Amino acid sequence: MDELEEIKKRKLEQLKKQYMNGGKNMEGNLPNTPLEITDADVEDNIKKYETIVIDCWAPWCGPCRMVHPIIEELAKEMQGKIVFGKLNVDENPMTSAKHQIMSIPTLLIFKNGTLVDRLVGAMPKPQLKAKLEPYK
């Protein structure tokens, strides 16, 4: 029972540190899971991270649901280089309109606060990873 308590204590300390660090993973000091992006915080996130890829999606979109696990995997694999975010276009119409999102999924790629590329449509993980490599 003492070993279990020690594990719980270590995990609690780790979670406290992560919480105090704004929810960021301590290893790369950048998130390793996609951020939930909204109209209210999209500009802050674009300015905050050197490179951020925002996945514009909707819950009813089949191809978006296919891309979701790929984005999750890439967020872990590219941690420290690229931050990923997810923006529900139905709940965030201002950002969708501003960036003229006409089809989903659409990935908006921002580098140093500037939109540098957009990728429209679902694609396999190797293809998506290759398209993101130049932005690391």
Image (cartoon, rainbow, N blue to C red):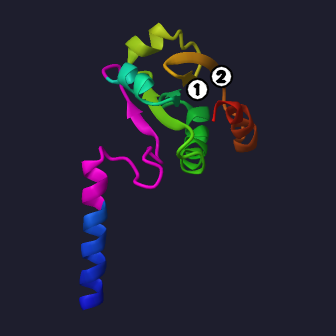
Residue at 41% in and 38% down: 35
**In the displayed structure, does residue 66 sit left or right of residue 92?**
right
Q: At which x and y percent is residue 28?
A: 47, 50
Which residue lies under the disc numbered 2? 120
Q: Are marks 1 and 2 in contact (CB under 8 Å)?
A: yes
Q: At which x and y percent is residue 43?
A: 39, 19
Relative to residue 45, is residue 4 depicted above or below?
Answer: below
**In the displayed structure, does residue 98 sit left or right of residue 104?**
left
Relative to residue 131, is residue 31 depicted above or below?
Answer: below
- Please rate how many residues cluster around mark 1, counting C-alpha atoms within 10 Å: few if below 14, some from 14 to 19, many from 20: many
Quarter of the image for residue 95 reads top left
Residue at 25% in and 49% down: 20
Q: Which mark is residue 107?
A: 1
Residue 91 visible in the shown view? no
Q: Amino acid at mark 1?
A: Leu
Quarter of the image for residue 68 reads top right
Relative to residue 89, is residue 27 depicted above or below?
Answer: below
Magenta span covers which residues? 15-40
- Please rate how many residues cluster around mark 2, counting C-alpha atoms within 10 Å: few if below 14, some from 14 to 19, many from 20: some
